[in-house]
Amino acid sequence: MKKRNALKLIAACALSAGAMGSFTACSEAPPAFVSVDVTGAEYAKGFTLTDHNGQVRKLSDFAGKVVVLFFGYTQCPDVCPTSMTELAEVKKALGPDGDKLQGLFVTVDPERDTPEVLKGYMANFDPSFLALRPAPAELDQLAKDYKIYFKKAEGKTATSYTMDHSAGSYVYDTKGQLRLFTRYGSGAPGLAADIRILLKQAS
């Protein structure tokens, strides 16, 4: 009897182990993003800002698209044009899915970045990209909501100042959920790969 019970126990353990192995094999590994995965973050949840066409925009306006949002200013000498150029490259790399990407540029220099200036600036990169212009009074709260840094660095004249600011972009999935933070200089191929993952998850 003891031998028979032992054999039953061994058989049961083997069956259980086999089931566990099958379950593990069928489980999908989490996506390997190039960008920093910030899924579930309790900040950068949305905005209500006017775009360069004078239209009030909210994050929900872009449902169904992956949104990449960057803070900068039009007179930025390097970081901003590089980031926006890379984003335009990402859109091209996505091919037919490029229409499912929405680029947003939020100015931290609303004093000089008028709607006309912002519209012309966006035209340098992609006509579908939108620039958003917070009122000066809104900018401080927006910076807190998005955990970004900006500070005016005085120049030789009143209008020749520069703006120190955070460099990086927030990436939202097609449901408007914050998913990724991509650091400046990460390159277009990595971001394009991340966006493909987000679009695949949405399909």
Image (cartoon, rainbow, N blue to C red):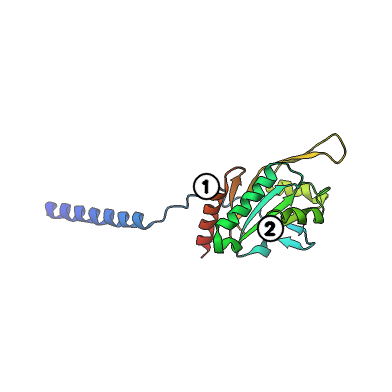
89 or 133, nearer to the observer: 89
* Residue 189 falls left or right of residue 110: left
How dense is the environment of label 1, judged by Cα within 10 Å: few (below 14), some, or many (20 and up)? some
The residue identified by callout 1 is: 34
| Identity, as a three-letter code, of the amino acid under mark 1 | Val
Q: Is residue 175 visible?
A: no
Please report whichever mark, 2 or 1, sits nearer to the chain's N-terminal start: 1
The nearer-to-camera label among 2 and 1 is 2
Label 1 SS: loop
| Identity, as a three-letter code, of the amino acid under mark 2 | Phe
Res. 151 image quadrant: top right
Residue 103 pos. (x, y %): 66, 56
How dense is the environment of label 2, judged by Cα within 10 Å: few (below 14), some, or many (20 and up)? many
State the quadrant of the N terminus.
Answer: bottom left
Label 2 SS: loop
Q: Residue at x 52, y 57 (%)?
A: 196
Res. 56 image quadrant: bottom right
Q: Residue at x 62, y 52 (%)?
A: 87
Residue 150 pos. (x, y %): 74, 41
User: Residue 161: which disc?
Assistant: none
Residue 59 pos. (x, y %): 68, 60
The residue identified by callout 2 is: 129
* Residue 112 falls left or right of residue 84: right
Q: Residue at x 24, y 57 (%)?
A: 15
Which residue lies most toward the right here? 158
Q: Residue at x 13, y 55 (%)?
A: 4
Residue 50 pos. (x, y %): 77, 59
Marks counted in the figure total 2
**Residue 74, above or below 173:** above
